[in-house]
Image: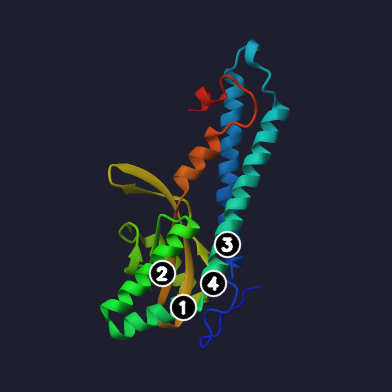
Amino acid sequence: MSTNSDSSHPTNQAPDVSGNTQRVLAIAVAIALAIFILGALTLQGLDQHHETLNTTQLKAIVSLKADQIEFRIEKRLRDAKTVQATDDLHQLLGSWKDTQYPVHRQSTEHRLSSIRQTMGYQAVSFVDSGGQRLLGVGSYQPTSPALRTAVAEAISGKKVIFSDLYAADEGAQRQLYVDVIVPIAAERGAALVMRSDEGKFLFSLLHKWPLPSETAESLLF
């Protein structure tokens, strides 16, 4: 199923995500299990007056949340396909790397900023094969060994890679992120890293209890 992009037309192929499926599914399954366990603990802690939130309702909640997680993953994959099919990103990076002109840098950063805002990412960056940022917008934490490995895999295999869910310090707070790594310019030894703030999404996912319950929110949080 894996399809490598031709080096002369690097942006016209759909991204190969087959090698990433297990990792992405593992994240989704882990989140769904966490929701189920939290719900089960909630039920155990309820007294008889609050036992209307039964097992059938809990299963409905888990199913709904799993669907929301699956939809978000599919959106990120669509983002990757859209970005990889965009010729101007490859051209902008090439112009800047070849000339180092400030005007080319500004044009590239403006385009990355547009992706960040329209697609809803915390940061969007061009990185080299070692994961070091070349150009980008949004805060970018020091490169971790896991990110270096993922970037190298994306570039060498010319396929989209999802990182594992990981925690990173952002100022005084600790955030949860997932990186979507797209080999925009693999022949130049570069890739695009789109960093998603999954902490906000997961908090919202658990916070919005979809069935009537006086105690579910307070017990879960």
Residue 25 in sight = yes
Q: Are marks 2 and 1 in contact (CB under 8 Å)?
A: yes
Q: CA distance from mark 4 to mark 2?
A: 22 Å
Give the residue number, with chain letter if any, for mark 4: 159
Q: CA distance from mark 2 to mark 3?
A: 19 Å
**105 to the left or right of 1:** left
Q: Are marks 2 and 3 in contact (CB under 8 Å)?
A: no
Q: CA distance from mark 4 to mark 3?
A: 11 Å
Can you give x and y, in whole percent of width and height, for residue 210 in the image?
A: 63, 32
Which comes sooner in the sequence, label 2 or label 1? Answer: 1
Give the residue number, with chain letter if any, for mark 2: 111
Residue toward you, 28 or 102: 102
Q: Residue 88 shows which numbered tag?
A: 1
Kind of residue at disc 2 = Arg
Residue under the point 61% across and 77% down: 3
Q: CA distance from mark 2 to mark 1?
A: 9 Å
Residue 130 in sight = no
For label 1, the SS is helix
Mark 2 or 3: the one toward you: 2
